[in-house]
Amino acid sequence: MIWQKTNPADDRNMCNWAMRSLLIEDGERLMLIDCGIGNKQDEKFFSHYYLHGNDSLDKSLAQLGFSRNDITDVFLTHLHFDHCGGAIEFDASKSVFRPAFANAHFWSNEGHWEWATKPNPREKASFLKENILPISESGQLKMIARNAQERVASEVFKGIDIFFADGHTESQMIPLIKYKDQTIAFMADLLPSTGHIPLAYVMGYDTRPLLTLTEKSEFLQRAADESWVLFLEHDPINECCTVMHTEKGVRLNKSGNLAEFCGL
């Protein structure tokens, strides 16, 4: 009943979720953060995770004057199918897998790659080899180094730090993007929606929920202190939000779209 108030389910006990990507243009670099579920899975798969609506990655890129071939970097927060499925597609014969972004580097990290390619029974259904192995086989895979002693890696790319989180899955990467005088955090599955802001509200998918509590607390405290804009990949209504300190802990401050928060 609690979740029914924040993320209501339908009569099949299924919820609506968005799969937003974020496009960053910086000089000659055109980086896409996460790339959705893709469309190459079979009918049975999409009976459980069916797509709806008219939005698509190709349409969104075209509205900005770009195509997949313009993407130079695909940053994968983690390799669960709803975040990386769009990285790989069938060729014209529908018999061979190939990168959906022919001219891009794909960015992961060694700890998470090892976790995803040798999956534990808990996450095996989320790590689909057809989404992952062709990236490596293409020669387009690049790894981001992680210092095990530090939670945040600074300036991994120009203007982008990375917050590493291990509660949802091993070495999930949360990009912290400096834009003008603001920080935009691409929240991936550390904070799927505004309904997940209270610390105890964590996903059933999290492999280490108690660790998620610690990571969310650390992250949201700083986000409230520094007025970060939180870009929500999965919230079906709210594209972004900010948070604030209250007597009950960190809570929602404002929600809206990225253009409203950043003057785009």
Image (cartoon, rainbow, N blue to C red):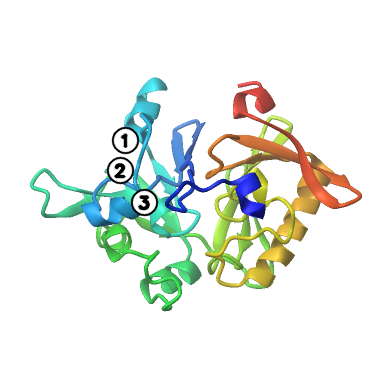
Give the camera-side residue of 49 and 108.
49
Q: Is residue 184 left or right of residue 114?
A: right
The reply, left or right, for residue 108 in relation to residue 135 is: right
85 or 52, which is in the foreground? 52
* Residue type at tag 2: Phe
Q: Is 204 drawn above or below residue 223 in the view shown?
A: below
Residue 106 percent coordinates (x, y) = 39, 52
Q: Earlier in the sequence, mark 1 or mark 3?
A: 3
Q: Which residue is painted at 51% across and 48% down in the image? A: 9
For marks 1 and 2, the one nearer the N-term is: 1
Cα–Cα gap, marks 2 and 3: 23 Å
Q: Residues within 10 Å of mark 2 (few under 14, many from 20)?
A: many
Would you say the residues marked 1 and 2 are in contact, meaning their CB atoms lie under 8 Å apart? yes
Q: Which residue position is annotated with label 2?
A: 101
Report the front residue among 29 and 23.
Answer: 23
Residue at the front extreme of this rendering: 11
